Image: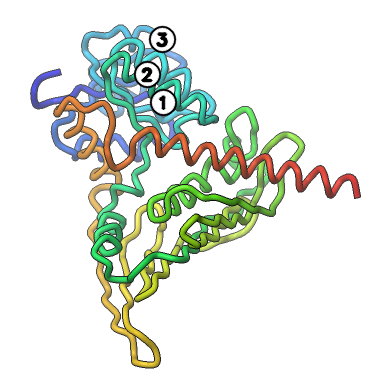
Amino acid sequence: MSSRTIRWAIVGTGGIARRTIGDLRLSGSAEVVAVASRTAATAEAFARECSLPHAFGDYDALCASPHVDAVYIGTPHPTHFDYARRALLAGKHVLCEKPMTMTADESRELARIAAASRVFVMEAMWMKFSPAMQRAVEVVAAGTIGEPRFLQAGLGFPVPPDGPRRYWDPALGGGALYDLGVYTLTLAQMFFGEPVAITTTGELRADGVDPHEAITLRYASGALAQLATSLTFLIPPRGWLGGTRGSLDFGEPLFSPGSLRITTGKPPAPPTVQEETFVKEGNGYVPMFRAVNQQILAGALEHPLHPMSATVRVLQTIQTVQQLLAQERDASQRH
């Protein structure tokens, strides 16, 4: 790695790799030099298509390569821990698609390895880095809407049973929570911190895949968050945050909002409404990639906006929700 350029490898050749490689190239301080896949032929085809000088059908060879400084992992959820662990142990910086891992303990272990290896690690939670979410954080910090007290957010779309396997196959981390709930839970964490009580209702199949759920989180401050995710019916990808003096409405899509509506005022007087729109860079991942590049070049091991501790806490909540759904399922079967 030079003092100004990070040489990146893409791990995986699926849809996420194709959506993000252009944004990584647009982020500055980054050069995409390699790709890794389970087979050499697939890696080589992707490398030709995207004009990459190096292709690896062997992951250990990628980790050992002197031509790669950092890896961006875009493979199915259950593979994340192993791929990230091996890269960190090899001294490579790691940015990994959400969810970072399947359990909180796995993410704790990755944070430990990264610290010991003195390399950067982060879950690719691009939502936090979007201009609209950054602006929302500024508005809340300024006290414009008063004290945040209530959040509602949802994400959902019907995926047919014969749709992409990753949604329904437990071996691929299928289910609504890991694919969509990670966003809504992260959003709640951004503004409220850690919940003191969690209730949920929904569906958990015998194989552990959750088609849908509704979650209520209660916080020590008295704040509440109501979140819904689904792979069986449509939930518009939106959300809003209510405070003691006003509210914020996040435009669609929630994970990369194109707009933000700031409403203030005290009834019965008419409210003051401020509409703000935001330009999307590339496919929306550019701000995250740029921020990660800057932190790596600065010698940081994590990004303060999304440290591994935040990832761990969201995964803990996901696991609690799964346990509650299992209890609900088992209770209904007994009756």
Residue marked by disc 3:
58
Residue 69: give its label: none
Relative placement, left or right, of 278 versus 213 is left
Q: Are marks 2 and 3 in contact (CB under 8 Å)?
A: yes
Residue 88 image-quadrant placement:
top left
Decide which of 26, 49 is in the foreground and name it: 26
Split into 4 quadrants, where in the image is the N terminus? top left
Report the front residue among 106 and 94: 106
Q: Residues within 10 Å of mark 1 (few under 14, many from 20)?
A: many
Q: Is residue 41 above or below residue 50?
A: above
- State the residue position of label 2: 36
Q: Amino acid at mark 1?
A: Gly
Q: Residue furthest front?
A: 220
Q: Which residue is found at the position 47% from the left and 66% from the top? A: 150
Of 55 and 204, the residue lying toward us: 204
Identify the colour scheme used. Answer: rainbow
Q: Secondary structure at mark 2?
A: strand
Q: Is residue 215 left or right of residue 279?
A: right
Name the residue carrying label 1.
12
Type of residue at label 2? Ala
* Dots 1, 2 in contact, CB < 8 A: yes
* SS at badge 3: loop
Pick whichever of labels 3 and 1 is earlier in the sequence: 1
Q: Is residue 227 left or right of residue 117?
A: right
Q: CA distance from mark 2 to mark 3?
A: 7 Å
Q: Give how far apart the Cα atoms at labels 1 and 2 are.
A: 6 Å
How far is mark 3 from mark 1, CA to CA? 12 Å
Q: Earlier in the sequence, mark 2 or mark 3?
A: 2
